[in-house]
């Protein structure tokens, strides 16, 4: 049948419509899925709060006022209660695992009191701060009363106090990550010349984690972090086992203007300390912020003496260390 002119026009319009519909369908099937390709919202960086050195100083003095925290002593038991109560008051879940014992090199056996505090334990991204909270039973580096314990203001109490002030700040302004504060017990009961006799609390924890498959992004050990004019070099073992964490912390200190405290050279001067089992047994990259004595190439001259009292604590040093820690924690996602 022959088509009229009007029929031809209608056929042309119909064909053109089909072509446009086809092109439209093709475009819709190949267009990107905006719902699936949308980027996840970025987590907002929270500016670090201001670390209060007066508060940290008060926490250190509170420990010292209890007396030497030698394992098995009344002061040791009282300090465990004080620290646990403070951490709970700042919203941390606190445990002291029961039934754990360690034997020292002189044959004594102690009930181990590792104090483990967790902020938002459900979060997978975590930062771990640690310090030892016990004091040494003797002051063998002194010239008198060597068989008596000292205050342990810097060697032990300073790291505990700084971490406690960090916990207080976390309770006021919540970071984007979980934070664990672990106070290791029976660190300072070792024999000089026998590295295996030190750090019994951290060694036990590293092989008997408080939580199955516990892991943290990294750990920072605080040991002697309150001395006047303290210098913190990049401790050799830390630089070897966790160089990226050393760089993270030292870079933060430099940005904040604390480069005179956190100096760039690497020095291996620590034998045994709590970060070693954290690295080697728990497999968590952990560094040691510990005071270095340039004059002796070792520890401060008041180390393991009766001079390690509140005179060995300086608020400016506490501020430098504490503010650096907060900067690192609040920069984590």
Image: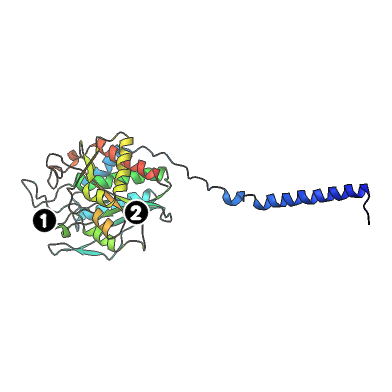
Chain-order first, disc 1 or disc 2: 2
Label 2: how many Cα within 10 Å (few below 14, some 14–19, many 20+): many
For the point 82% across and 51% down, which residue is it? 15
Q: Position of residue 115 (x, y in %)?
A: 30, 56
Q: Nearer the viewer, mark 1 or mark 2?
A: 1
Relative depth, front residue between 272 and 302: 272
Relative depth, front residue between 28 and 324: 28
Q: Secondary structure at mark 1?
A: loop
Report the side of 236 relative to 145 (left or right).
Answer: right
Q: Which residue is mark 2?
A: 117
Q: Position of residue 48 (x, y in %)?
A: 39, 39
Q: Which residue is mark 1?
A: 193
Asked whether the viewer can see residue 65, the reply is no
Relative depth, front residue between 239 and 206: 239
Above or below residue 233? Residue 182 is: below
Q: Position of residue 78 (x, y in %)?
A: 25, 53
Report the side of 4 relative to 124 (left or right).
Answer: right
Q: Are marks 1 and 2 in contact (CB under 8 Å)?
A: no
User: Quarter of the image holding residue 307?
Assistant: top left
For the point 34% across and 50% down, which residue is it? 87
How many labels were placed on the picture? 2
For the point 12% across and 62% down, which residue is it? 106
Q: Quadrant of the N terminus?
A: bottom right
Above or below residue 25? Residue 264 is: above
Above or below residue 19? Residue 106 is: below
Relative depth, front residue between 166 and 195: 195
For the point 30% across and 33% down, which residue is it? 257
């Amino acid at each position: 049948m022959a088509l009229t002119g009007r029929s031809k026009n209608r056929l042309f319009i119909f064909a053109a419509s089909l072509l446009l519909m086809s092109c439209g369908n093709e475009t819709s099937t190949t267009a990107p899925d905006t719902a699936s390709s949308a980027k996840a919202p970025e987590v907002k960086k929270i500016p670090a709060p201001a670390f209060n050195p007066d508060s940290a100083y008060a926490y250190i003095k509170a420990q010292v006022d209890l007396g030497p925290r030698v394992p098995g002593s009344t002061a040791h038991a009282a300090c465990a209660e004080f620290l646990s109560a403070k951490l709970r008051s700042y919203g941390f879940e606190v445990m002291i695992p029961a039934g754990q014992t360690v034997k020292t090199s002189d044959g004594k056996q102690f009930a181990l009191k590792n104090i483990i505090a967790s902020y938002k334990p459900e979060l997978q991204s975590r930062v771990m701060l640690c310090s030892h909270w016990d004091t040494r039973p003797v002051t063998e580096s002194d010239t008198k009363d060597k068989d008596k314990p000292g205050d342990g203001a810097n060697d032990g109490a300073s790291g505990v106090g700084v971490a406690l002030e960090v916990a207080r700040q976390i309770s006021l302004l919540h970071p984007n990550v979980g934070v664990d504060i672990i106070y290791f017990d029976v660190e300072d009961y070792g024999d000089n010349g026998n590295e295996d006799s030190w750090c019994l609390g951290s060694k036990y924890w590293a092989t008997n984690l408080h939580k199955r498959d516990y892991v943290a992004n990294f750990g920072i050990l605080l040991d002697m972090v309150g001395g006047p004019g303290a210098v913190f070099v990049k401790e050799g073992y830390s630089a070897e086992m966790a160089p990226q964490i050393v760089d993270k912390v030292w870079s933060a200190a430099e940005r904040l203007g604390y480069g005179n405290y956190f100096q760039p050279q690497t020095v291996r001067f620590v034998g045994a300390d709590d970060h070693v089992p954290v690295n080697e047994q728990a497999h968590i990259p952990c560094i040691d912020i510990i005071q270095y004595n340039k004059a002796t190439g070792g520890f401060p001259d008041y180390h393991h003496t009766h001079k390690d009292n509140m005179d060995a604590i300086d608020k400016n040093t506490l501020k430098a260390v504490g503010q650096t820690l907060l900067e690192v924690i609040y920069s984590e996602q």
